[in-house]
Image (cartoon, rainbow, N blue to C red):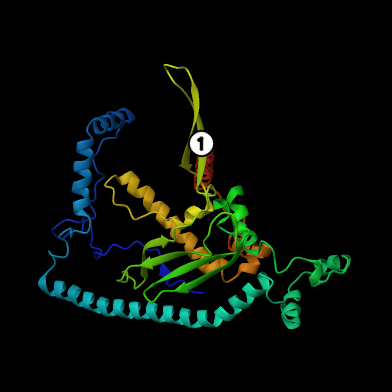
């Protein structure tokens, strides 16, 4: 399925030639090497020390540089009038192109929604089979078995005959197994597995506005009261530079944890001693901990002026969005392939197209060239001698 909706950072200001002179640049063949002396490591260390002692200076420089972003260098303004009009005309043509790009993305989205409506009955049938509410038809079983390897069929023949009544209903731990084979695996802790065993279905739906909602449906369990936990991904109202939808933020449901069963925190015990009486006591404190269920409490867009903090949040937002896209575009449509592990082979197919031996480090190649040059020089020297 096409991916018209992307987490694409867009500079809303049209690109302009930066670092160009205000006047037309002269064309000359007498270019000279810049006469800047080499900078020694000790000089860099001294400069770093100066910046470290003057954080206000760093902020001032960053502010000045930030104010230059998106500003014209003056190159276009310095062009002759007729040429500036032609540039303006090109911008008008580009505007028409942008309108068509936006229409294209909107039509792609509508096409996705059209086929999603056709996929939905298949997802509903899958859920019934997974949860033991319905058995697949003989025709469906026949088509599915045709894809299996012959040796697997022969191995099955050696097993004792089993009936549907003699085994568990449906496919136990279907979604947990599928998730553990996907990009979500690193998020799932041992403690999470007990709760995720009760996961009966993962669904999605499109919003009226650009965006989508993921729905995790659970059977009764000992950890929380929610029957369905959702997470919704929203996009900005305006399209990006290329007509793409731009990711804005995500919102997750609040999980109604049962007493003492919150998987997103752990209890730390600390012994304290009274200075006067010398008596000791145990103080318990809950602290956040890693858990898949943190997925439903996504980070908020950065508001802090601290650049490092903002960059960290941006990275977390990007990862969070990518996980949502993986669930929407990969896990839900091909859940059975993730359950069996076959999807891992498909995912690795592109990587296998390039063998390790097909590449070599550029540095090594340069060293080889230098070695050949040295050999040629040695031969030349020998000839002179």
Note whether residue 385 is visible: no
Q: Quadrant of residue 146?
A: bottom right
Note whether residue 228 is visible: yes
- Above or below — where is 178 with respect to 203? above
Q: Position of residue 73 (x, y in %)?
A: 17, 58
Disc 1 crowd rating (10 Å Cα; few below 14, some 14-19, many 20+) is few
In this rendering, would 120 be left or right of 91?
A: right
Q: Secondary structure at mark 1?
A: strand
Q: Which residue is mark 1?
A: 268
Residue at 14% in and 58% down: 22
Residue at the extreme front of the image, as rendered: 277
Q: Nearer the viewer, residue 196 or 270?
A: 270
- Above or below — where is 146 with respect to 35? below
Q: Nearer the viewer, residue 22 or 104?
A: 104
In this rendering, would 120 be left or right of 108?
A: right
Q: Quadrant of residue 196?
A: bottom right
Q: Position of residue 187 (x, y in %)?
A: 54, 52
In this rendering, would 306 be left or right of 223?
A: left
Residue at 62% in and 65% down: 346
Residue at 15% in and 73% down: 83
Residue at 73% in and 81% down: 137
Residue at the extreme left of the image, as rendered: 81
- Above or below — where is 246 with respect to 278? below
């Amino acid at each position: 399925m096409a991916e018209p909706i992307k987490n694409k950072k867009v500079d809303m200001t049209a690109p302009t030639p930066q670092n160009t002179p205000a006047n037309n640049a002269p064309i000359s063949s007498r270019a000279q090497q810049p006469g800047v002396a080499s900078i020694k490591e000790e000089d860099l260390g001294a400069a770093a020390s100066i910046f470290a002692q003057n954080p206000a200076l760093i902020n001032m420089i960053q502010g000045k540089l930030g104010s230059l972003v998106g500003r014209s260098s003056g190159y276009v303004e310095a062009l002759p009038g007729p040429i500036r009009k032609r540039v303006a005309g090109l911008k008008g043509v580009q505007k028409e192109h942008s309108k068509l790009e936006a229409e294209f993305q909107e039509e792609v989205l509508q096409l996705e929604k059209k086929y999603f409506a056709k996929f939905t009955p298949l997802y509903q049938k899958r859920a019934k089979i997974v949860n033991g509410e319905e058995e697949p038809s003989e025709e469906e079983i026949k088509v599915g078995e045709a894809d299996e390897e012959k040796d697997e069929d022969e191995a099955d023949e050696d097993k004792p005959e089993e009936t549907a009544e003699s085994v568990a209903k449906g496919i136990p731990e279907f979604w947990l197994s599928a998730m553990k084979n996907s990009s979500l695996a690193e998020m799932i802790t041992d403690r999470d597995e007990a709760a995720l065993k009760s996961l009966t279905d993962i669904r999605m739906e499109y919003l009226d506005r650009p965006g989508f909602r993921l729905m995790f449906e659970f059977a009764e369990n000992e950890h929380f009261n929610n029957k369905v936990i959702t997470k919704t991904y929203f996009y900005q109202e305006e399209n990006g530079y290329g007509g793409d939808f731009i990711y804005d933020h995500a919102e997750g449901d609040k999980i109604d944890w049962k007493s003492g069963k919150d998987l997103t925190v752990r209890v730390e015990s600390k012994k304290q001693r009274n200075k006067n009486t010398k008596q000791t006591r145990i103080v318990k404190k809950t602290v956040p901990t890693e858990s898949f269920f943190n997925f439903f409490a996504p980070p908020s867009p950065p508001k802090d002026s601290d650049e490092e903090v903002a960059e960290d949040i941006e990275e977390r937002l990007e990862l969070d969005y990518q996980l949502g896209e993986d669930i929407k575009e990969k896990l839900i449509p091909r859940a059975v392939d993730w359950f069996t592990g076959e999807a891992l082979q498909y995912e690795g197919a592109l990587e296998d197209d390039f063998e390790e031996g097909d590449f070599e480090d550029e540095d090594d190649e340069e060293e080889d060239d230098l070695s050949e040059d040295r050999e040629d020089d040695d031969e030349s020297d020998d000839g002179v001698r």
